[in-house]
Image (cartoon, rainbow, N blue to C red):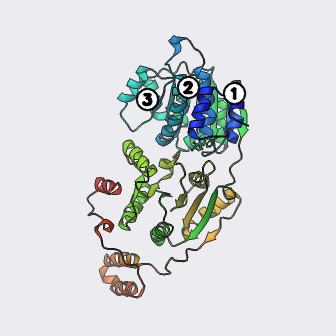
C-alpha cells in the first residue's frame, strides 16, 4: 500500500515525502479510506502508530476542496486532545499539511493568556486543535463559532477521560452541529470509552491496529531491581556508563521530578523537569532544548509527557513505575517510534512489585530482569551522609547509630565526586533558581 493509492492529493503527498514517510502505517492504511467515505470512526490506536497523520491528512484534503468564500475561515474541523503538549504536536502536523492547501490551523489550550487566542480566532481559522477546558471557555464567551464544524476528532480519548474531561467534552458537543463526522482515537477500549462512542458517534466503523508487540519489535525492555533510596545512584551510573545523551525519565510526582532533576544536576548530569506546575512557555522551551540535545535528561510526569514526540528518542527510564499499568505502555511508546529501536528500563523497588506484576499481566509477558554489574553493592557516601543527616535530626536516641553510619561510610569504597564548579549544586534559593540552573 502506498500513500498515492490512498487517494491523497499531490500537495499532501509532497508534504508526506518532506516528512520522510515512505509507506503508510497500518492505522493510516485503515483509517484514511474510512474518513474519505464519510463514516464515523472508532479507532483503537495508541500513540506512536502514526494516528495523527491518519486523521490529519484526510481532514485537510476534504476541507481543502472548493467551498464558498463566506464559509472559509470559520472552524470546520475540531481536534480535542488531552494535553497542551499533544495539542502542540498535533498542531505542528496539521499546520504542515494545512498550509499546503491554504488552510489555517490554530491551537487552543489553557495556562496561557486567552487574548492572543481570541485575536487568532477572530482573524479566522479552518482547523482548531484544542484542550477541552479552554475551548469551552471560548465557546461560552462566544469567541469561537463551532456551528460549522464538519469534523470532530477526539484524540487520545481514554486519556481525556482519565483526566476528567468527560463533562467538558459533552458541553463542547452541545455547541457542535449534529450533522458532522466524528472520529474517536483511543489506545484502550474501556466501558467508558464505549459509552462516549455511543453518545457521540453515529454507526462508527471500527478500526483496530494491533497493540505493538512492545518487547518483540522496536523496544527492548528490562527491569532493574533496586532499593528505593538508591535509584538515583543507579540512574546516574546508567547514564554515565552508557554515555546516554537523550533520556526521558518518568517520575510519579511533580515533586519527585524536581527532586530527581536537582540530584542529577548535583551528579553533574544536565537535566530538566517538565510537569504541570511549570508554565507552558517554560515547558515548550525545555522540550525544544531537549530535542536540540542541550541537556541529557528530561524528567517528566505522565501528564506532561503525554503526546511528547521526540524523534529518535533512544532511552526511556521508569524511575517510578506508573500506578496505572496502561501508562507503562504509553511511557515506553515514547521510544522505538516509527521504525527506530529503543530501550525502556524500569528501576523497581520492593514496594513496587505489585505494580510490576500488574504491568506484566497487561503485557502478557515477563519483562527480563537485569543486573547492573558495576553497581556497587553498598550505598555510596551520599546515602551514608544522608543517613547521617537523618540520624542527626534525632540526636539523643541515635547517636550510636550515627557513629555507625559514619563508620559505614568510611569502610564502603565510595566513588569520589569531582570537585570542579560545574558539579557543585548552586545554593538553594527557591524554584526559579533551580529552573535557571536546570537550563545551563
Ligand atoms: P503518532 O502516532 O501520530 O504520534 O506518530 C508517531 C511518529 O510516527 C511520529 O514521529 C510521526 O512523525 C511518525 N510517522 C507517522 N506516520 C509515519 C509513516 N507513515 N512513516 C514513518 N513515520 C511516520
Quadrant placement of the C terminus: bottom left
Q: Position of residue 40 (x, y in %)?
A: 68, 28
Callout 1 crowding tier (Cα within 10 Å): few <14, some 14–19, many ≥20: some
Residue beneath disc 1: 7
Give neighbour class at mark 2: few <14, some 14-19, many 20+ (Cα, 10 Å): many
Number of the label disc, if any, that sits on residue 137: 3
Name the residue nearer the viewer: 180 or 314: 314
Whole-percent x, y for residue 114 in the image = 37, 30
Give how far apart the Cα atoms at labels 1 and 3 are.
37 Å
Q: Residue at x 38, y 68 (%)?
A: 267
Check if mark 1's residue and mark 2's residue have beta carbons within 8 Å: no
Q: Quadrant of the N terminus?
A: top right
Labels 3 & 2 near each other (Cβ < 8 A): no
Q: Name the residue rendered at 53%, 37% in the picture.
A: 90
Q: Mark 1 and mark 2: span between their CA atoms?
A: 20 Å
* Left or right placement of residue 178 versus residue 34 in this view: left
Ligand 1: quadrant of the figure: top right
Q: Where residue 101 sits in the image (x, y, percent)?
A: 55, 23
Task: Say which residue label 2 marks.
Answer: 77
| 33 to 164, vertically: above or below | above
Category of crowding for the residue at label 3, using alpha-carbon neighbours closer than 10 angstroms: few (below 14), some (14–19), many (at least 20): some
Say which of marks 1 and 3 sits in front.
Answer: 1
Residue depth check, mark 3 versus mark 2: number of the one nearer the observer: 2
SS at circle 2: strand
Which badge, 1 or 2, is on the more N-terminal residue? 1
Of tags 1 and 2, the one toward the viewer is 1
Q: Nearer the viewer, residue 197 or 311?
A: 311
Amino acid at each position: 500500500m502506498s500513500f498515492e493509492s490512498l487517494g491523497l492529493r499531490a500537495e499532501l503527498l509532497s508534504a508526506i515525502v518532506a516528512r520522510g514517510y515512505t509507506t503508510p502505517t497500518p492505522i493510516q492504511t485503515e483509517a484514511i479510506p474510512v474518513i474519505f467515505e464519510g463514516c464515523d470512526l472508532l479507532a483503537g490506536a495508541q500513540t506512536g502508530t502514526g494516528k495523527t497523520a491518519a486523521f490529519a491528512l484526510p481532514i485537510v484534503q476534504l476541507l481543502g476542496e472548493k467551498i464558498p468564500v463566506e464559509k472559509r475561515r470559520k472552524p470546520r474541523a475540531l481536534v480535542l486532545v488531552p494535553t497542551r503538549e499533544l495539542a502542540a504536536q498535533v498542531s505542528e502536523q496539521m499546520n504542515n499539511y494545512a498550509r499546503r492547501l491554504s488552510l489555517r490551523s490554530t491551537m487552543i489550550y489553557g495556562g496561557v493568556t486567552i487574548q492572543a487566542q481570541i485575536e487568532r480566532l477572530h482573524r479566522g481559522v479552518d482547523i482548531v486543535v484544542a484542550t477541552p477546558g479552554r475551548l469551552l471557555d471560548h465557546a461560552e464567551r462566544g469567541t469561537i463559532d463551532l456551528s460549522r464544524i464538519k469534523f470532530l476528532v477526539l484524540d487520545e480519548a481514554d486519556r481525556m477521560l482519565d483526566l476528567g474531561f468527560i463533562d467538558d467534552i459533552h458541553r463542547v458537543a452541545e455547541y457542535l452541529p449534529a450533522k458532522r463526522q466524528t472520529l474517536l482515537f483511543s489506545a484502550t477500549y474501556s466501558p467508558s470509552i464505549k459509552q462516549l462512542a455511543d453518545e457521540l458517534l453515529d454507526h462508527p466503523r471500527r478500526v483496530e491496529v494491533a497493540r505493538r508487540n512492545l518487547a518483540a519489535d522496536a523496544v527492548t525492555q528490562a527491569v532493574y531491581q533496586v532499593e528505593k533510596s538508591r535509584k538515583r545512584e543507579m540512574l546516574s551510573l546508567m547514564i554515565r556508563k552508557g554515555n546516554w545523551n537523550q533520556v526521558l525519565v518518568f517520575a510519579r510526582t511533580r515533586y519527585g521530578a524536581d527532586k530527581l532533576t536537582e540530584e542529577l544536576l548535583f551528579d553533574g548530569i544536565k537535566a530538566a523537569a517538565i510537569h504541570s506546575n511549570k508554565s507552558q512557555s517554560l515547558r515548550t522551551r525545555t522540550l525544544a532544548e531537549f530535542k536540540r540535545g542541550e541537556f541529557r535528561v528530561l524528567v517528566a510526569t505522565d501528564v506532561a509527557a503525554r503526546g511528547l514526540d521526540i524523534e529518535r528518542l533512544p532511552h526511556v527510564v521508569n524511575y517510578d513505575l506508573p500506578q496505572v499499568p496502561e501508562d507503562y505502555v504509553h511511557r515506553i511508546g515514547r521510544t522505538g517510534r516509527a521504525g527506530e529501536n529503543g530501550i525502556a528500563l524500569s528501576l523497581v523497588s520492593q514496594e513496587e512489585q505489585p505494580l510490576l506484576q500488574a504491568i506484566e499481566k497487561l503485557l502478557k509477558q515477563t519483562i527480563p530482569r537485569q543486573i547492573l554489574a558495576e553497581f556497587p553493592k553498598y550505598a555510596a557516601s551520599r546515602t551514608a551522609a544522608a543517613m547521617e543527616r537523618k540520624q542527626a535530626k534525632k540526636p539523643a536516641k541515635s547517636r550510636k547509630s550515627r557513629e555507625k553510619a559514619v563508620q559505614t561510610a568510611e569502610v564502603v569504597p565510595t566513588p569520589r565526586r569531582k570537585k570542579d564548579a560545574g558539579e557543585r549544586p548552586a545554593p538553594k534559593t527557591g524554584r526559579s533558581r533551580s529552573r535557571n540552573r536546570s537550563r545551563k
